[in-house]
Amino acid sequence: MPIERASTALSRFKVLDLTRVRSGPTCVRQLADWGADVVKIEMPVTDDAGQLGGPRAGSDFQNLHRNKRSLTLDLKKPEGLEVFRRLAKTADVIVENFRPDVKHRLGIDYETLSADNPGLVYASISGFGQDGPYRDRPGFDQIAQGMGGLMSITGKPGEGPMRVGIPIADLTAGIFASQGIMLALLEREVSGKGQWIQTSLLQAQLFMLDFQASRWLMDGEVPKQAGNNHPTSIPTGVFTTADGYMNLAVAGQEIWLRFCRAIDRMDLAENPDYADGKLRSQNRDALNAAIDEVTRTRSTADWVERFNAAGVPCGEINNIDQAFENPQVKHLGIAQPVDSHERGASHLVGQPIIMSRTPSRIAAPPPTAGEHSDEVLREAGYNDEEIAGLRAGGVI
């Protein structure tokens, strides 16, 4: 029985998912969560139940593979490749994140498959690109964070490079790939033709440098580590309170004056060392120390109430459990229920986009391996006898 679709937004599109690890599954999750018919292609189940069952039951796997169907298929067998090529003839989208040479070796690259399906949108995610001197290097998120400059601007000055707390290169490469797929599907409505979309962890990481990249490219300035301080907007950062810490974001002259009034320190506003943003940046250490002396006198909750009333951006610094208990987070409903095959009643993070007519939801838990193999193959025209033969031969 077909699974329920997560949305009607992309429900007319069929996606073959060849991805693994994180960047590729992140891409495909975007499509599945907006209602595309995603068929996850997996190796047939082996006798090593621990190897397969452990990861499937893990929170990471559960988060990445909801709203999909599963077809087990051994692409190392000629019969498995033939099944895949047959499925590819009617697919709208194929997503893969193998090393660049693998798809060509298997004969399931864009050029080959698009010959029989000119409307095919084919997305490839790699570590460093489909060509170039680093083409064959294995890609990994932290490697991309380092090579892409992010670790050089993360952490406190003098403490050495620091990775961020999420696999941001993997995640953004996947999200950019999904954006590219949707752009290609939109363009296909005009041209009738598909195309090959490529992105990489390195490209995604460089793009995410954003204003830090433009500081170098346009101004010739090499950004450095600034810890919790914002590199250009002062005072913005973490400050001590009577019961913990809080964030402040005092950007621009008007908010600076509001801030000084809110902490009853107009002497700071009148101090020539802090007269404008450039001077506040030059004298940030002394300014931050003076502010910290004041913020230590009240609780975080007291300061948040006071600063919000004054129109000064601020906020508490939550642990992840506290973040999901936040009343605004609960109101937004981003933690959505799912009835997992392996874990029972659970919650996963839903999409951060609200659509008035075609919302997304977690409609189906991650599938068991091969849960939909017979169903998918029947849709492709295989009869029961042929399916039984594929299963007997270890192809599915």
Image: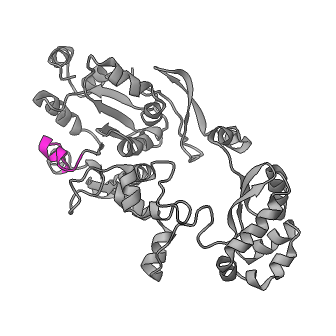
Horizontal side, residue 161 vs residue 110: left or right = right
Residue projecting furthest to the front: 158
Q: In which quarter of the image is residue 148?
A: bottom left
What is the x, y in percent for residue 373?
29, 23
What is the x, y in percent for residue 70?
34, 27
What is the x, y in percent for residue 156?
56, 62
Quarter of the N terminus within the rendering: top left
Q: Please say which color scheme the image uses.
A: one colour
What is the x, y in percent for residue 121?
28, 49
Q: Does the magenta stretch include residue 325?
A: no
Query: Vertically, is 73 above or below 140?
Result: above
Query: Vertically, is 324 above or below 4?
Result: below
Residue 186 visible from this viewpoint: no
Specify the segment rendered in magenta.
Answer: 99-110
Q: Of 339 and 33, which appears nearest the observer?
A: 339
Q: Of 295 and 391, which appears nearest the observer?
A: 295
Q: In which quarter of the image is residue 374?
A: top left
Residue 304 visible from this viewpoint: yes
Quarter of the C terminus within the rendering: top left
Residue projecting furthest to the right: 264
Total numbered badges shown on the rendered structure: 0
Query: Vertically, is 257 above or below 61?
Result: below
Q: Of 48 and 20, which appears nearest the observer?
A: 48
Query: Vertically, is 252 above or below 305?
Result: below
Horizontal side, residue 357 vs residue 294: left or right = left
Residue at (38%, 22%) from the top-left corner?
53
